[in-house]
Amino acid sequence: MSDRVVLSGERVPEPVAAPRTSPDRPRPKAAGAPSARAPRIAVLDGLRLLAALSVVLFHYLAGSGTIPWQGTAVALFPTLHKAAEFGWLGVVFFFMISGFVICMSGWGKSLQQFWHGRILRLFPLYWAAVLLSSAAARLGPHTPGEPKVTVGQMLTNLTMLHEPLGVNSVDNVYWTLWIELRFYLIFSLVVLLGAGHRRVANFCWIWALGSVLVPASGIPLLEQLLVPRWAPFFIAGIAFYLVRRAGRFEGETLGILALSWLLMQHRLPAIMQGEGHGINWKVCLAAITAMYLVMGLIAVGKLDRVQWRWLPVAGAISYPLYLVHQSLGVRVIWRWNEQWGPWPTLLGVIAGAVLIAWLLHRLVERPLVPVLRRLMAPQPDRARRSSAV
């Protein structure tokens, strides 16, 4: 079965909560019992699209970099601009959802299966986005002060390891992917040992404590691995998945969530300053707290009835929309907003970005993923096959 993140729509069968015979051993299956499959958590797909659209509005109307309007976004969109200033919080929601989904997709998987799923989900669309954004940067309209994209830069970006290699991103939004990869890397330890409630809970406690201690350790490698600034959001997502499996909030998971929230509120001013988001701390804290509450409702199944038919599509296009909206949309806005007017430009560019995201899903991801899956599948034992003949 294919698993579908980011900043991404997982298609993983969710286990039905049941009493655990041992915290780190799989529950025995009754003889002859059919395998139960819980309903898809479709609301997560809608939340991903909502998070992606909030980031889109932030980059188009309130980003700390170059705003692509000939006039100021404040003057053109006085009300929407104020809301768009908080759109960067969509990235926070992505990370929280990612903690939930990656824990779910890694549960009961081998390390090879886990990484095959991650590669299949992230890389086909990412490769297409890098090529598309590089072509737009070299051939399309240029915004003021935009650096030139070189062929070497584009090729290095295809690895998704360009940031530790000291190469600039083809598109600024790729910075979150390096954070995601580091999360996958450290969570691989849990997958390798075998995900169980006790191991995952211990992982959350250790990661939270490590994220506090590592900045003072003077060891850059540890700071890179433990991503202390963003760790609380991933940890919260993982804890919410533990709640989902248990079917209720328990004392330990409540403790993990409380610790992640306290660490989050402490680091929030640095996040806002570091990312150039000089807006109201209290409003941001309230918005993130609301995200915790929504994830809590999902964890205990209160939103399982939300099964609108369009939600899987929303989840499928959220990742490609995030990848391409800035590099393509900003150029269109810069080149044509004076001729089209502010509102037609904004709505048209958002609709165009959604359309491109859907096309990438249909024309790149869907045909390419099965090919890559076959290439990565273990080769059959030829000697065994020949001896069976």
Image (cartoon, rainbow, N blue to C red):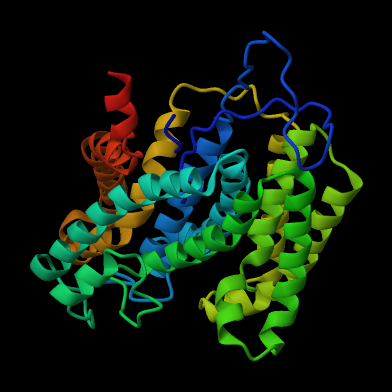
Decide if residue 359 is in sight here: yes
Give the percent coordinates (x, y) of residue 60. Answer: 36, 62
Q: Residue furthest left?
A: 139
Q: Position of residue 319 (x, y in %)?
A: 39, 48
Tell me: 246 left or right of 89: right
Quadrant of the frame with the N terminus:
top left
Q: Position of residue 115 (x, y in %)?
A: 46, 50
Q: Nearest the camera: 197 or 90?
A: 197
Q: Is residue 293 above or below residue 180?
A: above
Question: Image quarter for residue 388?
Answer: top left
Q: Quadrant of residue 14?
A: top right
Q: Nearer the viewer, residue 34 or 250?
A: 34
Q: Is residue 302 left or right of residue 68?
A: right
Could one spot residue 343 in this view of the protein?
Answer: no
Residue lying farthest bottom?
218
Where does the image place residue 236, in percent across and percent down from the top left?
71, 54
Tell me which residue sits at (82%, 32%) in the image.
20
Q: Quadrant of residue 38?
A: top right
